[in-house]
Image (cartoon, helix red, strand yellow):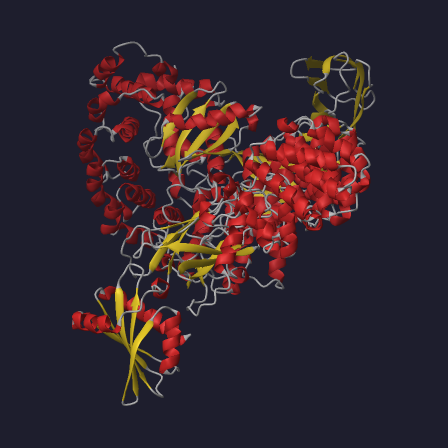
Amino acid sequence: MIHSLFLINASGDIFLEKHWKSVVSRSVCDYFFEAQERASEPENVPPVIPTPHHYLISVLRHRIYFVAVIQSEVPPLFVIEFLHRVVDTFQDYFGVCTEAAIKDNVVVVYELLEEMLDNGFPLATESNILKELIKPPTILRTMVNTITGSTNVGEQLPTGQLSVVPWRRTGVKYTNNEAYFDVVEEIDAIIDKSGSTITAEIQGVIDACVKLTGMPDLTLSFMNPRLLDDVSFHPCVRFKRWEAERILSFIPPDGNFRLLSYHVSSQNLVAIPVYVKHNITFREGSSQGRFDLTLGPKQTMGKAVESVLVSSQLPRGVLNVNLNPSQGTYTFDPVTKLLSWDVGKINPQKLPSLKGSMSLQAGASKPDENPTFNIQFKIQQMAISGLKVNRLDMYGEKYKPFKGIKYMTKAGKFQVRT
Amino acid sequence: MTDSKYFTTTKKGEIFELKAELNSDKKEKKKEAVKKVIASMTVGKDVSALFPDVVNCMQTDNLELKKLVYLYLMNYAKSQPDMAIMAVNTFVKDCEDPNPLIRALAVRTMGCIRVDKITEYLCEPLRKCLKDEDPYVRKTAAVCVAKLHDINAQLVEDQGFLDTLKDLISDSNPMVVANAVAALSEIAESHPNSNLLDLNPQTINKLLTALNECTEWGQIFILDCLANYTPRDDRESQSICERVTPRLSHANSAVVLSAVKVLMKFMEMLPKDLDYYGTLLKKLAPPLVTLLSAEPELQYVALRNINLIVQRRPEILKHEMKVFFVKYNDPIYVKLEKLDIMIRLASQANIAQVLAELKEYATEVDVDFVRKAVRAIGRCAIKVEQSAERCVSTLLDLIQTKVNYVVQEAIVVIKDIFRKYPNKYESVIATLCENLDSLDEPEARAAMIWIVGEYAERIDNADELLESFLEGFHDESTQVQLQLLTGIVKLFLKKPTETQELVQQVLSLATQDSDNPDLRDRGYIYWRLLSTDPVAAKEVVLAEKPLISEETDLIEPTLLEELICHIGTLASVYHKPPSAFVEGSRGVQHKRLPGSAGSGESVESPEPASAAVPEASPSIIPSQGDLLGDLLNLDLTPPTSTAAPPPTSGLQMGAMDLLGGGLDSLLGGDLGGNPMGAGFGAPASAMPPSFSAPASGGLDDLFDLGGGVGMPTGAYTPPKTMWLPAMKGKGLEISGTFARRSGVIQMEMTLTNKAMSVMTDFAIQFNRNSFGLAPAGPLQVLTPLSPNQSIEVSLPLNTLGPIMKMDPLNNLQVAVKNNIDVFYFSCQYPMSVLFSEDGKMESKVFLVTWKDIPNDNETQCQIKDCHLNSDAASNKLQGSNVFTIAKRTVEGQDMLYQSLKLTNGIWVLAELKVQTGSPVFTVSLKCRAPEVSQAVFQSYEAILRN
């Protein structure tokens, strides 16, 4: 099982270590540093690194490497999932997951890690159980603790840990009972230079914020559940009911949680909400290149495309660019060759464009590589897959909760090749 | 106010200050001090000096303080075992606390203190906690058993904790079940054959019930455990599959992958025509695709596993090609894996899409990735025949870009395409030749030279081209030099008139000015071939080469089967069997797919020791699952283990080898009778060192064959038996026997390469044995031994080796090494090989000796079913150096008096009674060393029966 954990910052310092079994020397991280040196980019460090006696499994989150050390055969996904859970927990507790936040709360961090694993076996990873065991630090609580001498460790056995609904604590009470659901879809696509879609798929999630008193039992039904043929559920969802009736039936955890994530595969037709017209040319023998880029909306069902950001890694031969945006601002970093254009909102009447020239190294030959544009955008009040919630009902409690559903579509890895 | 303040106390006297604070009366101050201590500990400072002071804080009602002290204890107890004893009482007390949280915490912490003295005290509280009324305590205690086992396995067994743990599998609480399974699995890893997790339909049912209710981590443990079970029939298999399928929709990717493992394994048992089988196949695709939308680290692990799945069941993902298309900002490790899977999924239906993508990748920024993409195009051409033309034109387009590394890579793969489709795409040669000057990498240069040599007759200026390479001959790498030598010889054989000077030049460069033995040997052999028999040279050098296929980069089926059983583990990430790399798994269970897949049941094993291991280890191919370096390894030095194509016929094989790594098979196989070989004449063992280079292997073998074959002796040679099954030899199979031919003991072996990579560098060694058998010379094996090829080797033995008595006496332990690994096996040689030729005793001496040896040393035994008369028996025995000294006939009974001498000088006297008409012989043996009698009997029996 998981032996030890090292947290390493961007400059390669180990700033926290935790051992669940015998102590593993820090020097084991040397193998990680070697791999880090070999990798051209921080994110290219391989996730599984063998060393003579151990294996290092790492994830990079918030510019911190979480490096787990294992000695025997352990499923790597198990370790990676656990590390993600650690990151989520830190974020949940401290608001951000940074080196400073971790150092500021080192004792809580240590207590958390101790609670999360026992001898390398996961013990309590559910946020609400952990919060009953170890209260998250707040300014108020630290002050109160200092004055009264009380502690931020719970005295009681967390009730959820043993119940049939371990994700929910008992005795939840709210004055305002509310349940909000956000349907967020990310569209991943590769568009080729002629504008046709090579591949497009949708990663959707339904995130919930449920603050309901008691033990509510919710059901959520969709207008078009057939879209959801590839889904991953929160453990609270009753799978049999879904199989039989295509209805989500569950006792929700308290607070924020991800109810389900789904995937609409490339085999379905996926609507592409923006198009890009581009013309990037380099002439042989000239030190100038032309750059012409226009964006436009399509298939957006009348909703506005907002927060548009275009970025691209221009060829290495490009020294500088001189461009003129019709709206928004652009930046170009001559060292990394990263072009970034903050477009804002697309106005269908007046399409945003970025035109101008690029200067190349004098005498250099025409660049070999074609830049790829990475596009980010947001569309409110629309789920691009067409998924729609039909109704939400609550059983088991008497009060009337306030319910709300929001839809949003975002670009995931949306790439346009030239 | 944050904890970072604890880090700032770096001034001197810090420990002293902390000590004072820890002993303070104020609770709050104490707690702050402990926090400071913990903070120092986390950053790796040594605060062990504070041990007694911190332990003093343990007796408190404050839960946080207690936990902090426990944290400290776990870290430092090992270095202060005597002090740690002080804490025991508190632990024992806490284990009785009314609060289950405290009970669990105490038993959990105690298990983490890896001090023997403490573990003794742990047993009683642990036993109570395992039966605690509160499931939270029970589940914590279950893990504690695993901890304790890690510290002191014997103690756990003696105390019967394992049985208690087994009982917990039937616990009413699913969390307890999951933890019990996890603990047992971990313990079982160090006891491969202990059968701790005795899986039967009842326990399986309990596990499946718990599966639905326990946490995600528990589900992983249970699924991994389920994967070890082998259902009784397809109905049980189906019912388990049905209950596991819902896990495919879990949010935790590790749960999903473990469920995939169970399904992939149990699917093997389902009949293919079953409706459910098809349903299951369809259900497997979406979760795998979903894994690819996760974080890159998860993607990587998922991709490595998908790589295995598509090799085993390509139908699952055959429509999902697009999800493997590379995004430009994927990390490089994800890109390369996706590329590999794309090629595995490539088929006639999707090849157009794939090629368009690959061409796109070839214009990316990352050089490594671009190279792999170009190679991938070549692999597609070889895999999908219909697409070859399109691939070639894509490659030509890429060559037109003139990007240096793209061109070089393209030329290397075009060479492979020529190997697969000879005489089809030669029109492109002109384009290739245009780029000759830009090639600076050895592999590309070698490939180009190969192409020029191979198609010399169609390239007008082939001689000029090759000559241009020759100018810098000494600066080239070996690979290029070897290829240039062969290329020019090919050219000469095709256009002898105008290239004589060139060939002279290259031969003299290779033989006189080079100190590389491979190059020199090849040069000499070409030279002699050309000067003695140009026709033979032509036949050899220009022989038809076998085609290559895409199969070469697939994982070997036995290994693939095992890896499928290990989906989701490190083994699946590295594509190696767990036995190959995981330290700490002291013994490894080999897993096999059930049902139809389990074809080759474990082969009969010659050594009793290995009989305990149920499955032999499968062969390994050095992981070339990545883009294969090059499909045919024309001119690399032998140790590189790129897979060579399977031979089409022995003759072709020989010819190909000639052009490839070594000339050995030429001499060993094709020209065995050529007197030219005599020029190299020297006994095998006396070969000068320079000849022991691979190319000379064949020569040695020639002489061995001459000595070994066709000796007309009547000596009995038992039939060959399997000594090393391929499963244990990582693809190397050895069967063999022993023979005595003209006074020399020969170990005759058949080596068969059942792996998919070439084997080279064979060597053999014996362990000390009863009669000092030792190889008289090195093991001469035609190098390299290609896949599916077998060869006969005859190894002369002497009896000058070190002696150690073995049991049985004629047991021989052998180690055989090749480029892959060292393999050990043991075999038994027939005693008859040790019977020496001078074993005939004078009849007088016989009489005296017979009387001289005490009767206690006489042993008697019967040989049944032997239909021979006494003369025939005598002749037969004589052939194996058992000499009849006298014969007497008494009352229809023939008495033969015989003698034999073992190589170590032990005489054995025998009296053989043959009753005419009866198939039963009676043998009485007398010997001063009666230990050998048993083995001599066996030889008698074997000789007479055959």
Residue at the far bottom in the pictured view: B891
From the image, which quarter does the C terminus of chain B lie in?
Answer: bottom left
Residue A72: percent from the left, percent from the top?
A: 40, 41
In front here: A8 or B811? B811
Query: Can the viewer see residue A395?
Result: no
Point 58% across, 24% down: residue: A40
Q: Please say if B881 is above or below B124.
A: below
Residue A390 vs B514, above or below: the answer is below
Residue in the image at 28% along x and 47% along y:
B130
Quarter holding the N terminus of chain B? top left
Answer above or below: position of B1 versus A150: above
Is residue B492 visible in the rendered structure shown here? yes
Q: Quadrant of residue B480?
A: top right
Find residue B281 and report its horizontal and vertical position in percent.
61, 54
Is A364 situated left or right of B274 in this image?
right
Q: Which residue sits furthest top?
A: B11
Residues B643 and B21: in front is B643
Image height of A288 relative to B580, above or below: above
Q: For residue B866, which quarter of the picture? A: bottom left
Give x and y (percent) for residue B612: 36, 58
- Residue B650: image quadrant is bottom right
